[in-house]
Amino acid sequence: MTQAERDRLVALKKAQKKLITQKQAAEELGITERHVRRLLRELKRRGDKIVAHGLRGLPSNRKINADTEQKAIAILSQPVYRGFGPTLAAEYLAKKHGIDVSRETLRQWMIGAQLWRAHRQHIEKVHQWRPRRSRFGELVQWDTSVHEWLEGRGDEILLINMIDDATSRWFARFVKSDSTVENMNQLEGYLKKHGRPLGYYTDKAALFQTAVKTKRDGSRKGKDREELPPTQIGRALQELGIPWIAAHSPQAKGRVERGFLTAQDRLVKGMRVAGVTTLEEANHYLETEFLPWVNAVLAVAPANPDDAHRPLEKHHDVAAILSHVEKRRVNNNYTFPVDAKTYRIVRKDICAGLRGSYVRVEQRRDGSITVRFGDRYLRVERCEVQPKAEPAKPATPKPPRKPAMRSDWMRNFNLKKASH
């Protein structure tokens, strides 16, 4: 019974129990009152099945008889028709044997007789253009382009770009390497200028997603694999409350990819004319010449003029969030290791429950190290000399085990003599 039939039955039973009038039932079901009275009489006589169609479960009057089906299968089972598909087989049955049957019906017959195997068609993937988001800041595409930006006039540089999906506005900068620190610097600049977007859309690079480690010639585990910890950028986005979305193909983030094609043409030629040879000169030309042109000419107005960016809150410590964060366990002497170096917590900052607990170690981008235990930051000092561990006490050798003493109380006992 379908949902529509169940709803129909509920209305009829309400009318039968006088909870609603026959007129109200007729309006609810979209039928006449006379038909409602007829259905109520049938409900009393036949039961709930009156809401289902009377021909349900019966064979169709247009169904081809079984003899025709068996004849067609026998013909198609001949060696001459080996490998025929439903379309070609239907044509030959109609032309040579006078059996007129549709392609879909014949396909079901052939699948049932194991003369044809249903398989998924290999269709070339077609990437349809995804519609833009409606508001500025709803989605920002983030990527890095490796290209000969200086055409050999200087060291190799890369372009990190954050492009808004709704407006195509750029926020870009040249860097020396596609590292976590450089991407965090770019992220900090975007946050301070615009605020927190509703989502970042990137590829599956190791900066954003922890790679699954597999053995050589091994296969990756599917859904049963353990959830891997986030990368430093992934953790920072979580603490900022910004969702991260992974693109499954370059075409999925086509807006930023097409933007790079524009830059690799116009920006490269513009820097060539300007004689740019260094990273500083490239960023100066980018900020003063190219980005103003892009955001004025190529950018579009969003469908909704509202700005979806959210401001940074008081608890968003950008310097702490955009740092390399690790957990370290505090030893009994209030020390902990970081990058083959040992740090000790200052005596005045020692508190209860610190020994054996884990602290959050933040290696800031300026090279400093801060340590947080709970909501409290602790002062630390580096130990120039490695603290000596207390020597372990030598194990006391155990005395040799004496052989077990055997009792002599059954020495002269004879079971045969005892039986007499």
Image (spheres, rainbow, N blue to C red):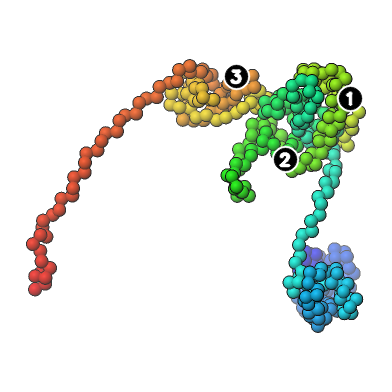
Q: Quadrant of residue 269?
A: top right
**Label 1 sits on residue:** 293
Q: Nearer the viewer, residue 32 or 300?
A: 300
Coordinates of residue 302 in the picture (x, y in percent): 87, 34
Mark 3 Cα within 10 Å, few/some/many (few <14, many 20+)? few
Q: Nearer the viewer, residue 348 or 225?
A: 225
Q: Residue at x 79, y 58 (%)?
A: 121
Amino acid type, callout 3:
Ser
Q: Which sits earlier in the primary sequence, circle 2 or circle 3?
A: 2
Coordinates of residue 402 in the picture (x, y in percent): 18, 45
Instruction: Work out how far the residue at label 2 is from the one at label 3, CA to CA, in angstroms.
Output: 32 Å
Mark 2 Cα within 10 Å, few/some/many (few <14, many 20+)? some
Amino acid type, callout 1:
Trp
Mark 2 and 3 residues: CB-CB less than 8 Å, in contact?
A: no
Q: Nearer the viewer, residue 175 or 407?
A: 175
Instruction: Work out how far the residue at label 2 is from the one at label 1, CA to CA, in angstroms.
Output: 29 Å
Residue 203 sits above or below residue 78 on the image = above
Q: Quadrant of the C terminus?
A: bottom left
Q: Secondary structure at mark 1?
A: helix
Q: Which mark is residue 368?
A: 3
Coordinates of residue 168 in the picture (x, y in percent): 85, 32
Q: Quadrant of residue 94?
A: bottom right
Q: Which sits earlier in the primary sequence, circle 1 or circle 3?
A: 1
Q: Residue at x 67, y 33 (%)?
A: 207
Q: Which mark is residue 140?
A: none
Instruction: Work out how far the residue at label 1 is from the one at label 3, CA to CA, in angstroms.
Output: 39 Å
**Label 2 sits on residue:** 246
Amino acid type, callout 2:
Ala
Can residue 285 be seen here? The reply is: yes
Q: Which sits earlier in the primary sequence, circle 2 or circle 1?
A: 2
Can residue 315 be seen here? The reply is: no
Coordinates of residue 216 in the picture (x, y in percent): 59, 45
